[in-house]
Amino acid sequence: MSVAMHVTNVMLKTGLYPDQITYSTLIQGYCKQHDMMTAKRLLESMIKVNLIPNIITFTQIIKALCDMRLVGDATILVDTLLKSETKPTVITFNTLLRGWCDVGDMNMAYKILKSMIELGYEPNVRTWNVILHGLCQQNALSDAMHLVETMSATSNAKPNVVTFTTLVRGWCKRGDMEMATKVFDLASKMNVVPNVVSYTTLMQGWCEKGCEDRAIEVMEQMKAAGVRPDVVTLTTLIRSYCKDRNMRAAMSVLETMRRTGLKPDVHTYTILMQGWIELKNMDRAMDLFKKMKRNKRVRPTIVTYTLLISGWSREMRRMDMAEKVMHDLMNDHNVSPNTRTFDTLINGYRCLFRENRTWRAERMYFWLCKMRDLRLQPTHHTVKHFTKMGLYFPAVDEPFWTTDFGMSFDPRRHGRRR
């Protein structure tokens, strides 16, 4: 976004003024980054030059506020729009409803829904699906079932595949696979055709219960209906087999995936790696990691690297290999270590109880310096690793964190103050 803003500033210097589309694009970008102060400044600049933001721009701001759980501010903005010439749309109200549902306040969601109807807005199927999602999140499945019955009987917005998939997910989350299956079957009876997400959701429910055989039955039913399983579908099975420590079955599904032309994604590889790590088979985990690195389409993420560092340090007590992975990460131009990665490595040294304490402390401080040099801030977990060993941890306002970048930890300079 800094590049986009720089281009805008260059435009202004050369006498070219941003139009409504430029402003809207910038506001959308800053909203996605949750930088609401910059978005607000851009909105004010836009109004100063007599460009009136449209409802799409305002809805983007409302969505960003809801994503940040600032639903009260989002509601005030919608109320303001209702008094202006730029009126909210059904999409605007749906966005606000989703915000209140996500924070678990269904009473407020229903109040907004009632106001919306009283103002002459007709809820669409998306509106009802948002309410349904909120009810399922709150485990209010009886109310959710009643809502779908009402939609079917009286509403112009009839239940669709998203409606039924949401309900199936709700029952699966509760662990009631009998009801999940009934709702799934009900969809077909109401001429709603299940899609790949619907089938995969039901499979996930069975896998959570440890019933991979029932999940495979659903997948066969899926194929018979002409719906092709995707990467998520097969990764669901892989995750379940890994959880059961049945790595032979998990690797067999991976082979099926390749044979049918499906490309394993980063989640597939990471889940398999975790399965091997839990069995302390780091060689197999590293084989998968190397395959990922050779594959230009699938790249390791920070989760992948942190998982491997944890495996070598916590499971195997091989800090040399953990550091090797960390060095690979620091040389990877596509991903950077985060605080959790450093915490994992530092904690590995803390847990080497049989090793020399002085050496462990030196390595912990070494990696703390690397963390500081990347301008990463410590968390309470970082502090805890040091205090549990009786080691001094520099406060965030001390020179260690504020000015001494590139310097090694020096007990005389950075040690406990007398």
Image (cartoon, rainbow, N blue to C red):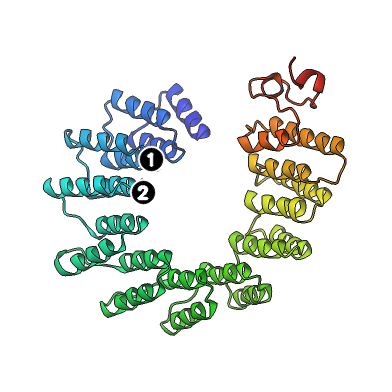
Identify which residue is drawn at 71% across, 28% down.
393
Tag 2 near tag 1, CB within 8 Å: yes
On the image, the x and y values in percent for residue 327 come to: 77, 45
- Image quarter where the C terminus lies is top right
Residue 288 drawn above or below residue 412: below
Q: Earlier in the sequence, mark 2 or mark 1?
A: 1
On the image, the x and y values in percent for residue 324 come to: 80, 48
- Under mark 1, the amino acid is Arg
Horizontally, is 9 left or right of 72 in the view?
A: right
| Foreground residue among 28 and 71 | 71
Which of the 4 image quarters holds residue 277? bottom right
Identify which residue is drawn at 20% across, 65% down.
151
| Foreground residue among 71 and 60 | 71
User: Crowdedness of circle 2 by 10 Å Cα count: few (<14), some, many (20+)?
Assistant: many
User: Crowdedness of circle 1 by 10 Å Cα count: few (<14), some, many (20+)?
Assistant: some
Mark 2 residue element: helix
* Circle number at residue 69: 1
Q: Is residue 310 visible?
A: yes
Identify which residue is drawn at 67% across, 36% down.
384
Horizontally, is 187 left or right of 381 in the view?
A: left
Q: Is residue 120 visible?
A: no
- Under mark 2, the amino acid is Asp
Mark 1 residue element: loop
Name the residue that disc number 2 marks: 102
CA gap between label 2 and label 1 equals: 8 Å
Which of the 4 image quarters holds residue 235? bottom right
Identify which residue is drawn at 47% across, 30% down.
5
